[in-house]
Amino acid sequence: MRIMLNGETREVAGPTLALALEELGYGGAIVATAVNGTFATAAARPALALKDGDAVEVLAPMQGG
Amino acid sequence: MSFYGVELASRLMLGTSQYPSPAILSEAIRASGAEVVTVALRRESGATLAGQGFWSIIRDLGVRALPNTAGCHSVKEAVTTAHMARELFGTPWIKLEVIGEDDTLQPDLFGLVEAARILTGDGFQVFPYMTEDLFVASKLLEAGCEVLMPWGAPIGSGRGLNNPFGLRTLRAHFPDVPLVIDAGIGLPSHAVQAMELGYDAVLLNTAVAKARDPVMMAKAFAQAIEAGRAAWQADPMEPRDMAAPSTPVIGKALLG
């Protein structure tokens, strides 16, 4: 399926958010996720099925003031 | 000093952005003595995983992270970011920013109060980035905030305290609420002034990160904040318009 990952179009097999994250190189990384603007907790990822056109945000700790 | 029941020895809180290198960031944090540093959430690339390295640096320093909602312009965006931050950093603390105007990065005070109310209801411990407005301060306290963080001047401007009268008034109205000057500090003398006004702490970033020697500047701020706090505790003299000789007149010889 085709999703928007952090604003860029990506092709993923999925079908869940957890599996898509593994596929996209985030396995084991400390990240927080949102799908279509709604927070998706780490606990919810294995059961959260992605669909074509979903906008996925993957955020990590970053420098801030 | 304590924030939400957490006792802190240092009254300097430091941002982690814009340093010349990760090594200088670490050294500046150590030199500052800060026990709380602000952090953000940004998009992570699966190819580089840059955020993972940054987070490991912060964890190794043993400091407490205060995540922010920097760049959020709406209540929904700020609330969602706060929830993501709580999971990511494992803390209920959130430095709540709802930006209302881009030239000054002035907070949207209406959105700020609304977001603060939602987040405290969700169990967050909110550090709201606000102006020195008294009425907004009272609304934020009603919303459940136990710390207030008025700006000194626009973020990154280094202008110091734009409205010392307003900040003094805020301190006088809320003598028991922990107050932190957040943003606008450019020099250690600005931090001294904030502490002399009776503020509990100072949060700054650019003034240290953008100094030619951030580590030395971090030390300078640590010393300034200690000096300003001691001055507040010592209860300074009142200024007056006329001179008053400090050397006694009594006993002066007649020589002329």
Image (spheres, helix red, strand yellow):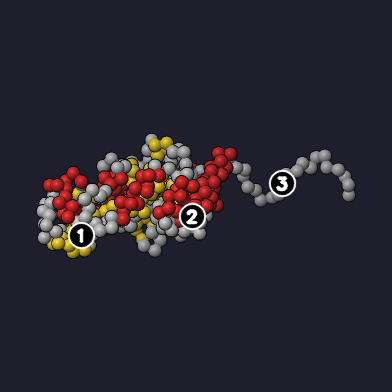
Q: Is residue B179 above or below residue B152?
A: above
Which quarter of the picture shows residue A9? bottom left
The CA distance from mark 3 to mark 1 is 70 Å
Circle 1 — which element? strand
Residue name at image x 52 percent, y 52 percent: B216
Residue name at image x 39 percent, y 37 percent: B6
Query: Is B90 or B228 nearer to us in this picture?
Result: B90
Q: What amino acid is labelled 3 in the image? A: Ala
Q: Is residue B229 above or below residue B51?
A: above
Q: What amino acid is labelled 2 in the image? A: Pro
Is there a contact, CB below 8 Å, between mark 3 and mark 2?
Answer: no
Q: Position of residue A23 (x, y in %)?
A: 17, 55
Query: Is B191 or B206 nearer to us in this picture?
Result: B206
Reading the image, the residue beneath label 2 is B214
Circle 3 — which element? loop
Reading the image, the residue beneath label 1 is A5
Q: Is residue B133 left or right of residue A58?
A: right
* Chain for numbered disc 3: B
Q: Quadrant of the N terminus of chain B?
A: top left
Reading the image, the residue beneath label 3 is B244
Residue B213 tag number = none
Query: Is B34 or B225 nearer to us in this picture?
Result: B34
